[in-house]
Amino acid sequence: MIMIKENTTSLLGYKAFNKDLTNLWKKKFLIGEKYQVSTEHKECGYHFCPFLEDVFVFYNDSSNMMVCEVKGSGDIIKYYNDVYDILVYASSEIELLKEISREEILDYYLSKNDYYVRRIVNFLIRGKLSMEEVELFKRRFSDNDQIMDTIRYYYYGDKDVYQRRLSKYR
């Protein structure tokens, strides 16, 4: 894991919490509040992700989580988490700006015309969508093979979808 100190005073990103706004270690947070790590934990910091879809790797049950837009400040370290294949920031200070509703999260991806397809695919894999939500993506991205193949594989159990795609190019 490579850690790089960021030369900026603050960064915006996303952080997931349990529904009661506690983190994985049961620490309670409040929206609108700013938190600072103690000096003995400064190298760890408050973790958050620059990309919305990446917060979903930390919670197995997306129905029991909430997502907030956050601002990290103070000492900020950027590192690549190779276990989850994501970029993560750790900051000595964090402020919870606002909760992002599930509808806002879905709209974030469904409203994009030029959004990087890989990010949408990552959300489909990590976001644990309901079948109603999957239908929204099917309608919106019906002309995108990569997104449709992801839906077929992860939501309909079509384990041969990628093999069929490869055989078209042989």
Image (cartoon, helix red, strand yellow):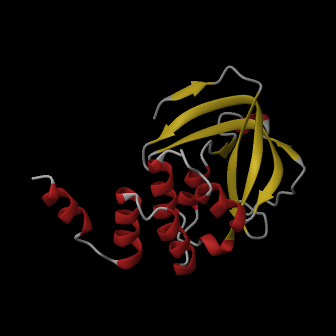
How many circles with numbers are drawn on the protein?
0
The structure residue drawn at horizontal position 26% and vertical position 72%, both measured from the top left corner, is: 159
* Quarter occupied by the N terminus: top left
Percent of width and height locating residue 38: 79, 39
Can residue 26 be seen here? The reply is: yes
The structure residue drawn at horizontal position 55% and vertical position 77%, both measured from the top left corner, is: 130
Percent of width and height locating residue 105: 66, 60
The structure residue drawn at horizontal position 74% and vertical position 70%, both measured from the top left corner, is: 19
Locate residue 36: give its quadrant.
Answer: top right
Percent of width and height locating residue 53: 57, 54
104 left or right, relative to 54: right
Check the image and name the residue furthest to the front. Answer: 143
Can residue 66 be seen here? The reply is: no
65 left or right, relative to 97: left
Check the image and name the residue furthest to the top. Answer: 7
The structure residue drawn at horizontal position 62% and vertical position 45%, both measured from the top left corner, is: 49
Locate residue 39: give its quadrant.
Answer: top right
Above or below residue 59? Residue 68 is: above
Check the image and name the residue furthest to the right. Answer: 32
Above or below residue 170? Residue 5 is: above
Check the image and name the residue furthest to the left. Answer: 170
User: Along the line of sight, which residue is nearer the eye, 126 or 82?
Assistant: 126
81 left or right, relative to 27: left
Percent of width and height locating residue 127: 55, 65
